Image: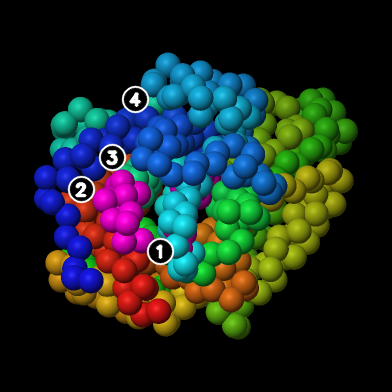
Amino acid sequence: MKSIQLDKDYLQTLIEWRRDFHQYPEVGWLEFRTSSIIANYLNDWGYDVKVGKEVVVGERLGVPEQLILDEYYERAQQNGAPQQWLDKMVGGYTGVIATLDTGKEGPTIAFRVDIDALPILESKENGHIPEQLGFRSKNEGFMHACGHDSHATIGLGFAHQLMHYKEQLKGKIILIFQPAEEGVRGANAIVDSLSLDDVEYLFALHIGTGVPKGTFVAGTYGFLASTKYNVTFTGLASHAGALPERGKNALLASAQATLALHSLPPHSDGVSRVNVGILHAGNGRNIIPSVAEMQLEIRGETTEINEFYEEQVEHVIHGAAAMYNIEATIEKVGRAITVPSDPKLAHILAKAARKTAIEEVIEYQDFKAGSEDATFLMQKVQHNGGQASYSIIGTNLAAGHHHERFDIEEDDMLLAIEIWLNTVFQIYEEL
């Protein structure tokens, strides 16, 4: 089959979807509006759509409190989320899996995008395009600052365009709109969905990440394994002047643990990262602090290195607590592993990309750029005998990822969809 190229006018549809998603950012397990709108489109186009507990079948990490779940559910209702899909997502069971079964013999191919936002206050500066053009976040304190609004749009546009080629398709195509990627919480909760059991080829994609506009990286390796923690130190309050000896100082224990965690030695087998990002303690200058709350993360070049530091974290935290005769509770709220893309599949993907207007195709690249929980989906497909690849579509960024002025160049969404459309038929050709 010849190269598939989309009408440039279709970009306007993508822009409308992306800017709508951008205005209503929802963080992990709160993507009620985003998921409902996606599910509604996919259902209208003829996909078999699953949401709620049909999608989220495993343990959910880092689920917000019930009051927050209720607040965002009501916000979604007020902001146009179709109720028929919302009803199935009560409690934060967000995300969508859609299947197109052609009824013809052929491979099962899955495509995964993430849909969640970040707890970041979006810039109001005049030079910030979403502010200029009127699509800045309406959920104050939350923002699509990593491009997941464009990922959701790429997935939706891809699903829409696939239906134009329905008669030429074979086997099954599965579309995964994953919740809670930030904090690496969502993929592990959906990986055991029955919809994923027979996947032979899995593709995931990210926009930006430092890759220049006009460049496509077909396969990557090097996302760091990671574990995220919430820790609570519980001591005993006392008057700091009158009875200091009766207090059990949670602040000092947490500070001791912070210094020790950041002093952990590097690992001889590869890179590692430790970061205490949040530390809160105390209620007044004359009170021995009874409670301290810490949020931290670790990362490792391999899953094994990360697991090594998981043990070290527990030793350090419980050791610091014992020094001050207090209690420490450790909660894992996110986790990712490291899994390489399959070079053979990356080669097929690169062939498909070269059929588009992409300027440069990098077939395979070591890519140490944070962590990604799509690796759980990749691992499952590979363990079942299939192949998986994680790709990067380049763009010019207004600011770095997780920055209050983050923005992309929207025309790159069109190119990403073209690459995935050509990839489907490239697989057929290879088979």
Magenta stretch in the rendered image: 157-183
Query: Could you tell me how far apart the alpha carbons at marks 1 and 3 are, in whole angstroms?
Result: 29 Å
Query: Could you tell me how far apart the alpha carbons at marks 4 and 1 are, in whole angstroms?
Result: 41 Å
Q: Position of residue 191 (x, y in %)?
A: 61, 56
For label 1, the crowd category at 10 Å Cα-Cα, with few meaning under 14, some 14 to 19 and many 20 or more, is many
Residue identified by numbered label 2: 410
Point out the frontmost of discs 4 and 1: 1
Q: Amino acid at mark 4?
A: Lys
Q: Quadrant of the C terminus?
A: bottom left
Residue identified by numbered label 4: 138
Q: Is residue 66 left or right of residue 393?
A: right
Q: Is residue 135 left or right of residue 52?
A: left
Residue drawn at the location 83% of the way across and 33% of the way down: 236
Residue 178, label in figure: none
Q: Amino acid at mark 3?
A: Arg
Q: Which image quadrant for residue 115?
A: top left
- Tags 3 and 2 in contact by the CB under 8 Å rule? yes
- Tags 3 and 4 in contact by the CB under 8 Å rule? no
Residue identified by numbered label 3: 18
Residue drawn at the location 35% of the way across and 66% of the way down: 424
For label 3, the crowd category at 10 Å Cα-Cα, with few meaning under 14, some 14 to 19 and many 20 or more, is many
Query: Could you tell me how far apart the alpha carbons at marks 2 and 1 are, in whole angstroms?
Result: 30 Å
Which type of secondary structure does the marked residue at label 4 adopt? loop
Which type of secondary structure does the marked residue at label 3 adopt? helix
